[in-house]
Image (tube, rainbow, N blue to C red):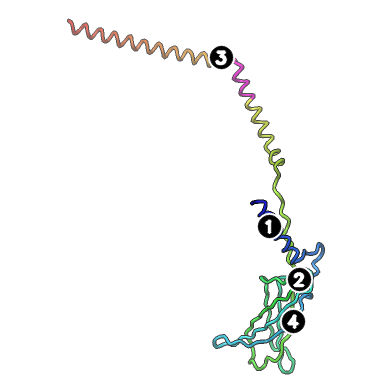
Amino acid sequence: MILRSVLLWLLLGTSAAMACGQPPAGPLQAGAADLSVVDPRLERVQRGEATVLATLVSLKNTSAACLEDVVIEVRYFGADKQLIDSATESFFDIVVPPGKTVAFRLDSVPLHPLSDYVAQEVSVISASPPRAAPAQRSGPGLIEHLLQWIPFLVFSTFLGFLLHWLRSKKSPQSQALELAAQQNILLQAQNTQLERIASALESHARSDKAET
């Protein structure tokens, strides 16, 4: 099941890479010049009491790579072909696949009466291929991980051997400690016997007084 999921993930990733094309190894070549403006239209949309200019335009990607971060500029002209207004909008969440056409809509609030807006000119200011994700540095492998533990394992082995050697070899200090411990045990036993003898003598003395 895990192997099947991994293979499916690899196939999906490969398909997406083939659809969008790989970014070139050198400087990025694809850009705004590869997006052709197709059939721009100017609509006047009533929203409540205000009227909004809505520009509908389709952009065709003529490059071999996906293009995103599209910035569109619309210039509005009057009857005398003079520039009277403009609008610019960025579309960072839309990707145009290679060879495909994607429709965009740009809304703007007019600065002049609607009758002054006779024509428009749509252009793509900027666009760029998806940037390659930075290569992630892989973590240490199993061998590197084990090599990191070698000093600790060597030190633990040496410490265990040293403790075993100290326990097996009775130095004068360890012998003195063992002798002191044995003497302490004997003294405790003698004290216990003396306490029992004292208790017996006291009981015997009390019984003699009771008889007299």
* Residue to which mark 4 is pinned: 38
Q: Is residue 52 magenta?
A: no
**SS for dot 4:** strand
Residue that carries the numbered disc 1 in the rendered image: 8
Residue at image point 63% right, 20% down = 165
Please state if 63 lies on the left or on the right of 105 as rendered: right
Question: Whole-Å distance between the Cαs marked 1 and 3?
Answer: 72 Å
Of marks 3 and 4, which one's residue comes earlier in the chain?
Answer: 4
On the picture, is 1 further left or further right than 31?
left
Crowd band around label 2 with a 10 angstrom C-alpha radius: few (<14), some (14–19), many (20+): some
At which x and y percent is residue 62?
79, 74
- Image spot of residue 52 (x, y percent): 61, 85
* Amino acid type indicated by mark 3: Gln
Above or below residue 164? Residue 201 is: above
Question: What residue span does the magenta drawing correspond to?
Answer: 161-174
Is label 1 in a helix, a strand or a loop?
A: helix
Circles 1 and 2, Cβ within 8 Å, touching? The answer is no
> Which is in the foreground here, disc 3 or disc 2?
2
- Helix, strand or loop at label 2? It is loop
Is tag 4's residue or tag 1's residue first in the polypeptide sequence?
Answer: 1
Closest to the camera, between mark 3 and mark 4, is 4
Camera-nearest label, 4 or 1: 1
**Amino acid type assigned to the residue bearing label 2 in the image:** Pro
Q: Quarter of the image for the C terminus: give it.
A: top left
Residue 135 left/right relative to 192: right
Residue that numbered label 3 is attached to = 175
Mark 2 sits on what residue? 98
Query: Mark 1 and mark 4 in contact (Cβ < 8 Å)?
Result: no
The tag earlier along the polypeptide, 1 or 3, is: 1
